Amino acid sequence: MGAKIIFYLIAGLMILFSILSVSTTRVIRAAVYLLFVMILMAGFYFFVGYNFLAGVQLMVYSGGIAVLIVIAVLLVHNIDHRMERIPVVEYLWKGGVLLAGAILTILTINQFPFQRIAGTEDVSVSRIGTKLLSLGDGGYVLPFEVISILLLAVMVAAIIIAKGEVYKNEEK
Amino acid sequence: MIEGITVYDVLAVSTIIFFIGVFGFVTRKNLISLLIATELMLNSVAFNFVIFNKFLYPGHLQGYIFTLFVIAVAAAEVALAIAIIISLYRMDNSVDADEMDTLKG
């Protein structure tokens, strides 16, 4: 019973903050509501017992991405900046179509007979680390290395793009 | 497995969050709002991986590890997107998706 209450509380708050995040007219508030959604999702990961994943979610999403978005908002907008309101007609037809899509998806999911594969749960950090760097069966060393190179390339590219010197040279 | 909660309940939550993200993506014009909506969608997809791992394959780690990868890719994507947004703002003094036509020549 207690678990059910916690789950419905987390789910309800997550949906509420997602709706607020896409419907508010202030970008900075949208970023903060997104931060709340991410923290609640980390709460759900703690709730199902995935502690390391919840820590990563809190660090990377709430600590990194949300702060990055807030800084970007502050760089390109005045803090009181308001976006124009979405017209009611647009709200209704886009919201209606997407609501129908969501209901259809949920109904389809509910008809699928999911099979639970029994097994003993072991999500200790040492097992995750061994899996990530294992070359053997069920190892993830190739995706791990690809992600490492992707992160390096993206960081270099982000610095070069944000410096913007390419455009300046062209103008001269 | 958490008692009283089925995989369908949790999948419904992640579906709803995904469609809210799509709604934000199709209604907003501000590039940062588009980025926020994309993050909502990515978050709900990572959530799906976790749910499948927890409820259907408790002995495996696939969903767990791919969620870590999704989080890493999302971090990379946001860093690059924000660099592009700041660079576009320098050129055009605006972050409206409607006014972006620099590559049209």
Image (cartoon, coloured by chain):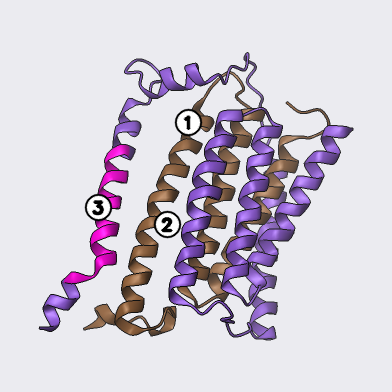
| Amino acid type, label 2 | Val
Q: Which residue is mark 3?
A: A156
Up the image or down, A78 lies above or below B85; here it is below
Mark 1 or 3, which is nearer the eye?
Answer: 3
Position in image of residue A36 (x %, y %): 66, 54
Q: Amino acid at mark 3?
A: Val
What type of secondary structure mainly makes up the magenta span?
Answer: helix
Mark 1 → mark 3, Cα distance in angstroms: 25 Å
Residue denoted by label 2: B78
Magenta stretch contains residue B78: no
In the image, farthest residue toward the left: A172
Residue B58 in the image: x percent, y percent? 62, 22
- Please report whichever mark, 2 or 1, sits nearer to the chain's N-terminal start: 1
Distance CA(mark 2)–CA(mark 3): 14 Å
The colour with which the image depicts chain B is: brown
Whether A154 is drawn above or below B37: the answer is above
Q: Which residue is mark 1?
A: B65
User: Do the residues marked 1 and 3 share a common chain?
Assistant: no
Residue type, numbered disc 1: Ile
Residue B38 position in % (x across, y down): 51, 60
Residue at coordinates 51% horizontally, 80% vertically from top-left?
A78
Please tell me whether mark 2 sits on a helix, a strand or a loop.
Answer: helix
Instruction: Give the chain letter at badge 2.
Output: B
Neighbour class for label 3 at 10 Å: few (<14), some, many (≥20)?
few
- Is disc 1 on the same chain as disc 2? yes
- The answer to which quarter of the image holds residue A151 is top left
Q: Is residue A154 magenta?
A: yes
